[in-house]
Image (tube, rainbow, N blue to C red):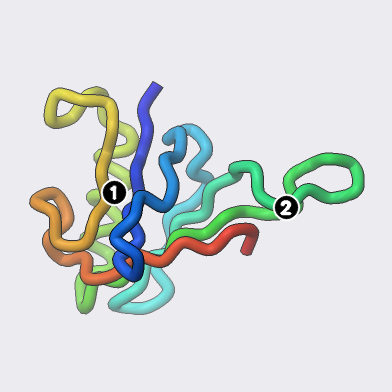
Amino acid sequence: MKYVNFTDTTTAAMVNIIAADKIMSIQTTDADTIVVKADIIGSLDTAGASAGFDGITITATGNAIVVAKRLAEYISGTAIGGDNMLDVTSGNTKFPEVSAIVYAAVV
């Protein structure tokens, strides 16, 4: 199984490690912003089902489309870089355009 680690730049802590098969969409909202929605356990509704998607907002000034496509490529690939964990962190070598990542549960 492949995993993705999104590191929140506001706390410099590991925010969430998500199984890649739980990522439901990668959307660009403007030239600077990517929103990744994942179907992971957040708030539950009365029937015990997930009440919504968790969202990770990534800022990549002027490069949202480039980063969104690269993220999709890495997620769909097998053992890129020799491991099964994709680390999406502000300014790392795979995503140098990213300047901020913010995680929000159930959006």
Q: What residue type is disc 1 on?
A: Leu
Residue appearing at x 62%, y 64% in the figure? 107
23 in relation to 7, above or below: above
Q: Which residue is mark 2?
A: 43
**Mark 2 nearby-residue class (10 Å; few <14, some 14–19, many ≥20):** some
82 in relation to 15, above or below: above
Q: Nearer the viewer, mark 2 or mark 1?
A: 2
The one of 61 and 40 positioned closer to us in this rendering: 40
**Where in the figure is residue 6, as x and y percent of width and height?**
35, 51
Secondary structure of residue under mark 1: helix
Residue appearing at x 30%, y 66% in the figure? 9
Residue appearing at x 41%, y 66% in the figure? 102
Q: Which residue is mark 1?
A: 71
Q: In the rendered structure, which disc, 2 or 1, sits on the residue that comes first in sequence? A: 2
58 in relation to 51, above or below: below
82 in relation to 59, above or below: above
The one of 21 and 12 positioned closer to us in this rendering: 12
Residue appearing at x 37%, y 78% in the figure? 30
Residue 61 lies in quadrant: bottom left
**Where in the figure is residue 82, as x and y percent of width and height?**
14, 24
The residue sitting at the right extreme is 46
In the figure, is residue 75 to the left or right of 16?
left
**Where in the figure is residue 97, as x and y percent of width and height?**
16, 66
In the figure, is residue 41 to the left or right of 34?
right
